[in-house]
Each structure stands twice: as structure tokens, then as C-alpha cells.
Image (tube, rainbow, N blue to C red):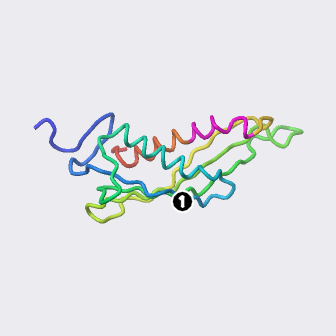
Amino acid sequence: MFFQGCYSFRGVSLDPLIQSYYITPFVNNAENALPSLAQTLEDALREKIRTESRLVYNDSEPDIEFRGTLVDFRITAEAPRTGEVTAINRLTITLAIEYFNNQTDKQVWKRNFSFFYDFPSDRDFSSIESDALRTISNQLMEDIFNAAFSDW
């Protein structure tokens, strides 16, 4: 009787009938994005779900499915200073995610998830790239996971 209803672990709410998930290969539609970024983000979501839920990865007949598209990868100038073009640059990454429940053959939701990383304009992007991508990826995965598995 204690385990009836939805599965809950660290705020995760899952129907007990949902046992498996699949993530289709993410599509990269973002101009200027790193060629491997879509794959990196797909792997990050797979790892997030694997480590923080009881779901099993299954590429044939999964109960739920995620489809993703990298839609934006942009560096913009922020916070201009007097006499300078800018003081801060901002890297923004946006993912479009579709979440399907294959048990009901319905799309549960489709949303864009976006996060940014600010860095000093006097720093070259390659010097902050790994930290920026890790920070953005961690937040995007947290947001996607919460949208799919929490009652937020």
C-alpha cells in the first residue's frame, strides 16, 4: 500500500506503468553550433534520466520518448561600457524538446528550453568553452528533467 500511486524520488513523479524511455538522436539546426553539441546534449539527457530515475533505456517500444532539436547557439554582446563595444558576452543555447507518452500515443508537451552563460568580452570563447557548455548543459538537463518528471 505504501508504494501505490506515482513513483517519487527526489521530487520525481512517475506513473508506475512507465518503465522505459528512449531519446531519439538530437537534430542540430543551430547555425554556428559546435558539430558535436547536439550529440553531447542528447547524451547528457540520457545520463540524467538514467541516474535520477528508475527508468530503463529501451530503443524498441519505450513507454516515453524524447525528441530534441538544437535550435539556437548564439554569442551576443551584453552590458556595453562607455568607450567600449561591450563588457560581457553571453552564450545562449536553446533546445526544442518534444515529450511523448507512447502508451497513450500522445505528445505530452513540446517546449523550448534555454539557458545562458556570461563571460568577459576580453576572454576568447575557446578559453571558457568547456565550462560554459557544462554549465548550460547541466541547467538545461535539470529543466527538461523537471518538466518531464516533476509536478512543477
Residue that label 1 marks: 27
Q: On the image, which quarter does residue 28 sit in? A: bottom right
Residue displayed at 57% across by 41% down: 136
State left or right for residue 4 relative to residue 61.
Answer: left
Query: What is the tally of numbered marks visible in this picture?
Result: 1
Residue displayed at 45% across by 41% down: 142
Residue 42 screen position, x and y as percent: 49, 50
Residue 51 screen position, x and y as percent: 37, 37
Considering only vertical position in the picture, is 112 above or below 135?
Answer: below
Residue displayed at 89% across by 39% down: 83
At mark 1, the secondary structure is: strand
Image quadrant in which the C terminus is located: top left
Q: On the image, which quarter does residue 127 sit in? A: top right
Image quadrant in which the N terminus is located: top left
Residue 6 screen position, x and y as percent: 22, 44
Q: Residue furthest right?
A: 83
How crowded pointer 1 is (Cα within 10 Å; few <14, some 14-19, many 20+) is rated as: some
Q: Residue furthest left?
A: 1
Q: Residue furthest bottom?
A: 105
Residue 44 screen position, x and y as percent: 48, 43
State left or right for residue 71 relative to residue 126.
Answer: left
Please name the amino acid that badge 1 sits on.
Val
**What's the magenta bit mostly, secondary-structure-wise?**
helix
State left or right for residue 143 relative to residue 2.
Answer: right
Q: Is residue 121 magenta?
A: no
State left or right for residue 38 relative to residue 149.
Answer: right
Q: Is residue 128 magenta?
A: yes
Residue range in magenta is 125-136
Residue displayed at 33% across by 45% down: 151
